[in-house]
Image (spheres, helix red, strand yellow):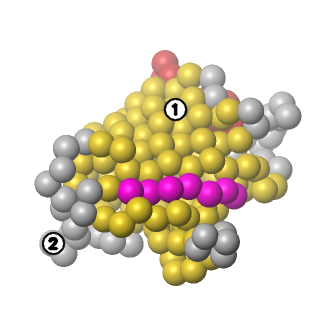
Amino acid sequence: MPIELDTSMHPDLAPLAWLLGQWEGTGVAGYPELPTVNFAQEISCTHDGRPFLRWETRSWVVDEDGNRGEPFETELGFWRPLPEGEVELLLSHPTGVTELYYGKTEPAKAELRTDGVLRSPDARDYSAAHRLYGYVQGGLMWAVDMAALGQPLQSYASAQLQRATATD
């Protein structure tokens, strides 16, 4: 399904337009010293006419039948396109972590690495991450590698989502 650009959208957002909308799907997370978890996720990506996207994710642990259980992770943030296909992603987590990512966009792809991580005194050890997002066959796929808990950068989580509603 081709993406129609919203005429109220700031023109700088064109390289990220494929992220717009409401997304739903499932994924898996696993990391040394943490249990492997299957999760359901919802992502909301919107704009208000200014040159940034508002990003919100919510996820829940799911059982073997796909039923949602306890909340898993949530994040709030903003995508900020920069000149020449560069992009920033600012994210805050209720666990006391705020991240600044920097990277590149290509058609239907964004690859970012942490440029800075700020942790509150009681947040778990977490020092870096690498994120990859792609628009693949009409769906949103993402994968995250992280360095945390004394471990080097390695695979942490991935998910595949489908558009739940049209773009804003």
Residue 128 shows up from this direction: no
Q: Is residue 141 above or below residue 68?
A: above
Looking at numbered disc 2 in the image, what kind of residue is underneath it?
Pro
Q: Which residue is mark 1?
A: 110
Residue 145: % across, % down: 36, 44
Q: Is residue 93 above or below residue 110?
A: below
Residue 82: % across, % down: 47, 30
Q: Residue furthest top?
A: 84
Q: At numbered mark 1, what does the secondary structure look like: helix, strand or loop?
A: strand
Q: Residue at x 24, y 63 (%)?
A: 33
Crowding around mark 1 (Cα neighbors within 10 Å: few <14, some 14 to 19, many 20+) is: many
Q: Which residue is mark 2?
A: 121
Direction from residue 101 to residue 49 in the image, left or right: right
Looking at numbered disc 1 in the image, what kind of residue is underneath it?
Ala
Q: Is residue 83 above or below residue 57?
A: above
- Between residue 81 and residue 143, name the one nearer to us: 143
